[in-house]
Image: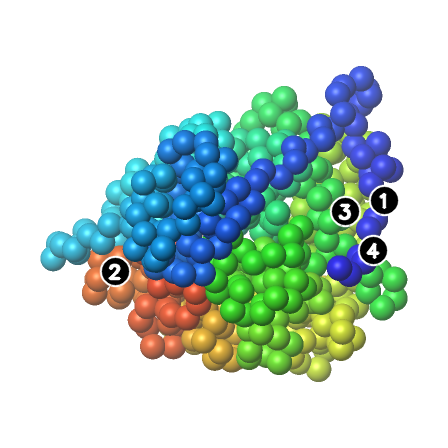
Amino acid sequence: MRAWKVLPLAAVAAACVEQPAARPPVTAPPLAAPATPADLYGTLFQAVQMRRIFADGKTFVDAVPRRDPAAIMADYRAAPPADDAALKAFVLANFDVPAEAPTVAPSAERPPLADHIRALWPQLTRPPLVPRAGSSALALPRRYVVPGGRFREMYYWDSYFTMLGLESDGHGDLTRDMIEDFVSLVARYGHVPNGTRSYYVSRSQPPFLYLMMGLVPDVDRATQARWLDALIAEHGFWIAQRSVAMPDGATLQRYGDARFTPRDESWREDVETGAGDRQRYNDLRAGAESGWDFSSRWLADGRTLATIDTTRIVPVDLNSLLYGMERAIATRCRALGRACAGDFDRMADTRRAAIERWLWSADEGRYGDFDLTAGRLRAGVTAATAYPLFTGVAAPGRGARAADTIARVLLAPNGLRTTTVATGQQWDKPNGWAPLQWIAVGGVARYGRDDVARMIGTRFLATVEREYRASGKLLEKYDVEESRPGGGGEYPTQDGFGWTNGVTRALQERFAR
């Protein structure tokens, strides 16, 4: 396990107590991470996953035991099933297994796309959740929206882009419910998990909580204080758990995970890729924390998943979002009369200087990811170059140059490419993803390139519309070179789909389509 530089938090925490300082601590100690299905079911779990008893590795980890896990395991050890059929029968007798997402035959009728999305929100909304005993699901006190398909739970960064559509369609109450769910997760675990399952708690995802809160400006002072406490706690997680030292001693953050084992939900795939290498398992998990699982961004040779080294990369998107979080926390500190505003402004200023020094390529006119092993930026333009523009960390001249690079290199006939290399991974060319379209549209427009923003947004909208007219579906990702469903990755392209719905409605509103 590598040693990572960790920043002291005591001074920051002390400065963030509301004045006068007669209130409870900013955060309670987080709960211990819950046991995952791999922890609970050991050899049974490994047999089910490695023998592919279910086509999707996510099926068993989302199953709910019908009785005490210890009793199930005692019976399994006493009489191990003789073959795959017997093993499946044992699982079905002892667990309630989630059904596959139903495939609905599309109607010949096609209401307008916006009307179709409005009709999807109730289908993707779930009530407050009190999990059954033994479930991998995490409790949630308020309603929430799932992406759809195999994704039966609430996900962290997905939800911001989903909320954009909820806001467009007048569901601000649901946006606020989901924010409260995330705040409750920070209170319990010290960070927002990747998703609301026990097997996701060891990692987070790109920190969009501050941006979600920015969608709901009119909240009472007590709520503002609770939300600020959650942001400060989340910031502390990234600083304490994900910090790395740059060559000059500056500190930035990287993606990671607390575990060094295959992912529960992709156990067989990770075992085959990791081949027993604990660090490689951790790098696969870190790639999942990035949300870009997987991409040439994280591959040492730029093409082969077995060379993944995510934890050796200092990512521009994460650090740009943390800059935005620090500015947002400073603003909220000032609004509540807390003494922490200056501290977080100074942290943001320090981060900006480090980003501009280490994550910018003057020769290529782009922002990128720093390779700690090689001591330089990793090669290649990716859509992550739009993040410093989106959060405003980029210097004006550099932001303008990066916008030109985005238009010249990443803009495809049907939207924004994710990268410029085709590896078969889903976060690479030719795929385009709804969240990255929104980040790029907002980023280039912030630096005066409304023309590029309109091209990105309207081309992607046309792609979504064409697929909807053809199949009746909104998809997780699209091939923006050929205007067809996207491909690659560990599972089939999903439809539903939360963040595509949200970004589509927000782009329609922005460009009056």
In the rendered image, the residue lying farthest to the left is 108
**Horizontal relation, residue 40 to residue 230: left or right:** left
Between tags 1 and 2, which lies in front?
1
- Closer mark to the observer between disc 2 and disc 4: 4
- Give the number of the disc on residue 48: none
CA gap, disc 1 to disc 2? 51 Å
Q: Residue 8: which disc?
A: 1
Q: Secondary structure at mark 4?
A: loop
Q: Residues within 10 Å of mark 4 (few under 14, many from 20)?
A: some
Mark closest to the chain's N terminus, 4 or 3: 4
- Which amino acid type is marked by label 3? Ala
Image disc number at residue 240: 3
- Spatial separation of the CA atoms under disc 1 and disc 4: 10 Å
In three-dimensional space, the C-alpha distance between marks 2 and 4, rounded to whole angstroms, equals 48 Å
Question: 10 Å neighbourhood of mark 2: few (<14), some, or many (≥20)?
Answer: some
Q: Nearer the viewer, residue 26 or 343?
A: 26
Q: Position of residue 136 (x, y in %)?
A: 48, 40
Nearer the N terminus, badge 1 or badge 3? 1
Query: Which residue is the site of mark 2?
Result: 468
Q: Residue at x 34, y 45 (%)?
A: 90
